[in-house]
Amino acid sequence: MLRIGSLAGIASPIIGILMVLLSIYFSPWFSWQENALSDLGVEQSGGTQIAIYLFNIGMIIAGSLIALFVVLTRSILASNRRNKIAYAILFIGGINLALVGIFTENFPMVHRTVALMYFVTTPISLMIIGSGKIASDRTFGLFSIGAGAVALVVILGLVFSTLGIPIGEIYPEGAAIPEFIEAVILGMWIGIAGIRIFKTGKI
């Protein structure tokens, strides 16, 4: 089961990012400077159904694989409150990523909530996991904290603007670039964690 969980972690970012890029390929209307990635999941002028399916199915699969990764690999972390909280938050992040593909922009309030939950909870979980790993594996611990912190900073302006908090024109046009940067950072961590578990049985 542990090996299946590690493979789920490795596959999640590959599938998620690939499906996003394929969706963009089939969406000639899409602009990195003017759109959000979630725009790919709904009908657009000049858009294609295949692009919509690719994006939404990609989010559902990638998020579900993160949740599966958590469920099948949680036993390798020391059973303490910090790790339980970190893995619970990571599980929530995965579930909310999957929900992004179910509750598209056609359900604006729900979509906004699940998207923000993924973008905020996942980097927080990485920082918590990293703080617990520093003593035993300083390199991976610092990597986890750094990845979580950078991802959170990248998306923070978007979160504030979405909530209507005026902090200047950080993202005056589209949200796709910061969203994609955070997705790559978080995906890289999940993939590396999966590889570590697959090779050593430890995160």
Image (cartoon, rainbow, N blue to C red):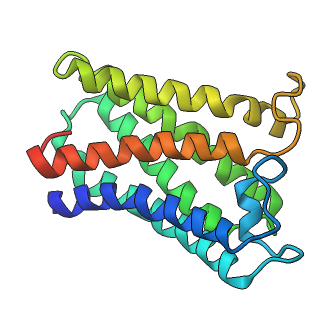
Task: Say how many tags the image has.
Answer: 0
> In this picture, is 162 found above or below 47?
above
Residue at the (66%, 82%) spot, across then down:
50
Give the quadrant of the C terminus. Answer: top left
On the rendered structure, is 152 left or right of 186?
Answer: right
Residue at the (88%, 27%) spot, across then down:
169
> In this picture, is 76 found above or below 157?
below
Residue 6: image location, x then y, percent: 23, 55
Q: Residue furthest left?
A: 200
Question: Would you identify the image quadrant in which residue 103 lies?
Answer: bottom right
Residue 34: image location, x then y, percent: 84, 50
Q: Residue furthest bottom?
A: 49
- As rendered, which of 159 and 10 lies closer to the eye? 10
Residue at the (54%, 46%) spot, across then down:
183
Residue 163: image location, x then y, percent: 82, 37
- As rendered, which of 85 and 172 lies closer to the eye? 172
Residue at the (72%, 48%) spot, across then down:
176
On the rendered structure, is 164 left or right of 155?
Answer: right
On the rendered structure, is 24 left or right of 83?
Answer: right
Question: Would you identify the image quadrant in which residue 57 lies?
Answer: bottom right
Give the quadrant of the N terminus. Answer: bottom left
Question: Would you identify the image quadrant in which residue 30 lies?
Answer: bottom right
> In this picture, is 178 found above or below 60?
above
